[in-house]
Each structure stands twice: as C-alpha cells, then as structure tokens.
Image (cartoon, helix red, strand yellow):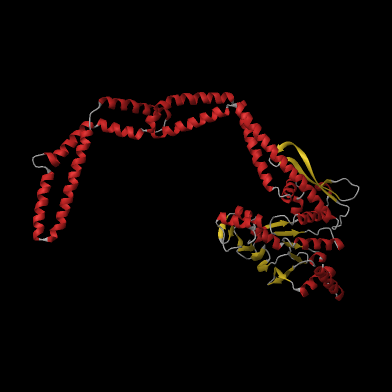
Amino acid sequence: MLRNISLRDFILVEQLDVDFRPGLTVLTGETGAGKSLLVDALALALGARGETGMIRQGAERAEISAEFDVSRLAECRAWLDEAGLAAEPGECLLRRVIDGGGRSRAFINGSAVTLTQLKQIGDLLVDIHGQHAYHALLRTDVQRNLLDSFGGAEGAVQQVAQAWQAWKTARSRLEEAHTLGRERAMEREALTAALADLLPARSDIEAWNSLQAEHSRLSHSTALMEGCAQTLAALDESDDPVLSRLAVLDHRMGELAGYDAALAPIGELLASGQAQLGEAVHELRRYADRLSVDPQRLADLDQRMGEVHRLSRKHRLPPEQLIELIRDMQSRLDALNEADNVEVLRRTEEAAAAKYRDLAGQLGRLRKQAGKDLARSVNSALSELALADGRFEVRLQPLDEPRASGLEEVGFFVSTHSGLPAGPLDKVASGGELSRISLAIQTAMSGQAGVPTLILDEVDVGIGGAVAETVGRRLAQLGKSKQVLVITHLPQVASWGDQHLQVSKTVVDNKLQSDIRPLDNRGRVEEIARMLGGQEITPTTRRHAQEMLELAVEK
C-alpha cells in the first residue's frame, strides 16, 4: 500500500508531504484547487511521461517520491530481488526527478533505473482510474483481461499464447517446405558438394596444430641431430667435458669450505648445477635416440597439409577456422533435410494445432463460467447504483480465426432499461453510467488478487442524492480489501472516507500555491458542509454534515 508521497517544486507545490492510511481516502476541494495534482504526481512517480511544465515556476527541478509497503506483496518483492533493487524488508521507495532541461531521472530504493523498470514496478503497486481509464473499459482487450483476471485464468491464457506460437511456427515451417522446396534442394546440393570436399580432410583440420609441429620437426631433423650431438659432446663426450670440469670444481669448493664455512652454500649450488646438468644430458640422449630422418613421412605430411591449405584458400578462412565451417554446413544441411521432410512437418503441425485447441477450449470453459459469475456480481451492484433496471452480460463470440488470446472474443454488454436489448458497452452506456458500471466491476473484482492500491478520479460523474451515498458505501466496501483513493466533489461520497484530505489554493508572495492537508473530525464537518452549502456555511449545513458522517460510521 501507499504510505507517503513527497512533492518538491511540482506545478503549484513548493513542498508537500502526505501520509496515507489503509482503507478509503477521499480527496476534496473547491473547483480549480488542484485535486488531480496528487494523482498526476503519483503517476509521474510510477513512470508516466514528464514535462518541464511540471516544474514550479522559478525552480530548477521537480522531485516526487512515493513510499510503499510491500511486505504482503510477494510478486513485488520477487521483482525487486530479481532486479537487484531490494532495500529494507517490506519497503519500496520510488523517486522521479525532472530538471529544467527536460531530462528525467528515475530511482528505485535509491538506485538509478530506467522508466521501463519504474513502470513495471508501478503496475504491481497502483491502478489509476481516471476518465480515460473508464473509456479504456470500452476496449475488448481490456474487457478480456478483466474477465481472465476475475476468473483466475492468467496461467491458462499464457499456456494458450505459447501453444498458439508453437502452432504458428510449425505451420510456417510446413508452408515454407511447400513453397521453398526448389531453393532448398539447390542449397542442399551445394552444401553436400562442399562437405564432400571438406570431410576427407576433417581429421587433418582437427589435428592441424600437431601436424604443423611434426612437419617442422621432420623438416629440420638433420639440424636437430647435429645440434644434439654437438651439445652432448661439449657436455659429456669431449676430451675435457663440462660435466667433468664441474665435478672437479665442486670437489675443490668442498675442500675450501672446510677452511671457511661461508663457502658451503656456494658448494651446494655447484653440486645442484652438476646434478641438473647431468639430468639434461640424460634427457638430451633420449631425445637424440628418437630422432630420425623419414622422407616418406615428410612427403605424406606435405601432401596432407597442402590439401588443408587448398581448402583454406578456397573458403578464404584460416585452417584453424575450417572445422567451424564444417560444423555450420552440417548443421544447416541437417536443418534442410528436416525441413524438407514434409510428412514429419505435417504431423508436427497437426500435433501443435491439437494442443492449442485443447488448451484454448479449456480457457473458453473458464471464461464461460467466469462470465456468469462476474455478471451476477455486477448486476447485484447495479441495482444499488441507480441502475436497478440495468442488466450486465458477458458474451463470448467465436472468432473466425484462432488467436493467441484464444478461440473467442470477450464482450461486455449492458442494458440500462428494462425491455431494451443489451448492447455493447461502448454503444449503450453514458459517461455517468460507465463510471458506475466500472465501480461495480471493481467491487466485484476486489476479492481477486491484484494491485493493492486503487485510485479513482471522477467515479461520481453524473450522479447525486441517494445514488451518491450508495457509491460512497461501495467505495468503503472496496476499501476493506484494497487501499482506495477517491477524488470526489460529492459530500455523500466524502462522508464515507476513513481518511479525508483537503486540497486548497493560497497566494504566497504573489504566487499561487496548492496545499493538501488531512482533516480531523471538525475539519471534515466544515468541508462537507461547504460541499453541501457552497460559500455560506450555516449551522443547518453543519448539522447535516455531522449527521452524514455519523450515519457513515454507523453503517
């Protein structure tokens, strides 16, 4: 739920901090006082588009912060954890800054984020319904999503969408096999010829580095043998070999160390050098014994390496990259062979289609039952909202072509008078009726999982009297399962609030400023009396306001 919103230099606000409570919060004020200012600021904190006109005149930048309690929102906490943006347990702080140059910056729990991320987390926290949102209810996709949410069918919707995509892919591959068969045959023929040229040399390509090493050794075998012989002679096989001279020096140093112990470490180094030189002589003899001149083997290597060089020049690739070329060609050839197997593709397409239709059929049955339940709940609410003769229906119209959303289109139909046939919502409902129908739907869905905070603007358009009182009662009922913030101009609605905020305008230093302050019981009486009686507040209107507040508490 929304805990607090803080504004700095936003439109007509210099500095403002507002705390919120659970339940129903009503926001009232005189016409033009800026009641929608708070909603606009919150929308900005949730990722809405920002403009330089939102910066208070004379200020360098506007800043909005919104603090939320997410301790009971597992999905929101999981999102924050996955994005690496979690902070204090159960807390989420959104912040938006707009400067005079039009640059906008967004933050979640103090970390800079993109507007896309801000919108993603905002969709999990707040649902804002203004007049545009009521009109969004006229769209069939919005109606379908509402019904699926009411019926708990989101998982089934995702499965159907995935099955439709799999069917679409299988169908495309089958159609492609029919239409592109000739091009594929030509490509397959070219790949087969290329692989027939490459594959005989595959083992040599894979062993290219070892072939180069062996070829270098055989090519220089005479030089290697001569060098080894010369080195062995100098070390151990000449008239005065290095090893013998080193042994004499080691013995002499041992004698000298008997006169001065400081020479002992030097003697140890000479002894170590003698041992290592002896090991080198041993290893060099072993190496020399294995050396041989093999002209036949060298010719064989020349031929094999020459073939690899030919393929390298032909395909314009270094020898080391030819093996990757072979793998790519083989993979593409396998794909072409599979693609040209029309019978296999046909069976795959049929299986994908059957799976889609099975899942879509299950989704359709879920929607049918959810439509009945939603209509029953909405019709019960309409009778209390001055639409006693109204009738709400959910109709499922079969589609001519299957879609990712299923096999049927969802439509909300309504009749506002008895005896009249129900028609599409966008053709029948007026503005005032639409707001009441939307409220009835929101009330019906209040028990469903969803965002915890609901903001309603102009929900009471076109109503008054007893209907307005019923709307207030409905909103209070909705506030038991969600945090609800309502902007209203009706005292009958305002009297039902668990929290009452008043918006006012003042002139400070010849500048207009907006302010929002919470009202205590006395302040609520004055504000509701103003809403009842206008400019002049009489004792009678105050008594009436007090009575309205008391009745709302009792009910």
Q: Is residue 411 above or below residue 524?
A: above
Q: Is residue 538 above or below residue 359?
A: below
Residue 358, image quadrant:
top right
Q: Is residue 59 visible?
A: yes
> 460 or 286: nearer the eye?
286
Q: Residue drawn 63% across and 37% down?
A: 166
Q: Position of residue 187 (x, y in %)?
A: 52, 26
Image-based side of 41 in relation to 245, left or right? right
> 513 or 235: nearer the eye?
235
> 63 or 540: nearer the eye?
540
Q: Position of residue 375 (x, y in %)?
A: 81, 50
**Image quadrant in which the C terminus is located:** bottom right
Q: Position of residue 213 (x, y in %)?
A: 30, 34
Image-based side of 251 in relation to 78, left or right? left
Q: Residue drawn 40% across and 26% down?
A: 200
Q: Residue furthest right?
A: 419
**Image quadrant in which the N terminus is located:** bottom right
Image-based side of 133 in relation to 107, left or right? right
Image-based side of 27 in relation to 429, left or right? left
> 251 or 118: nearer the eye?
251
Q: Is residue 103 visible?
A: no
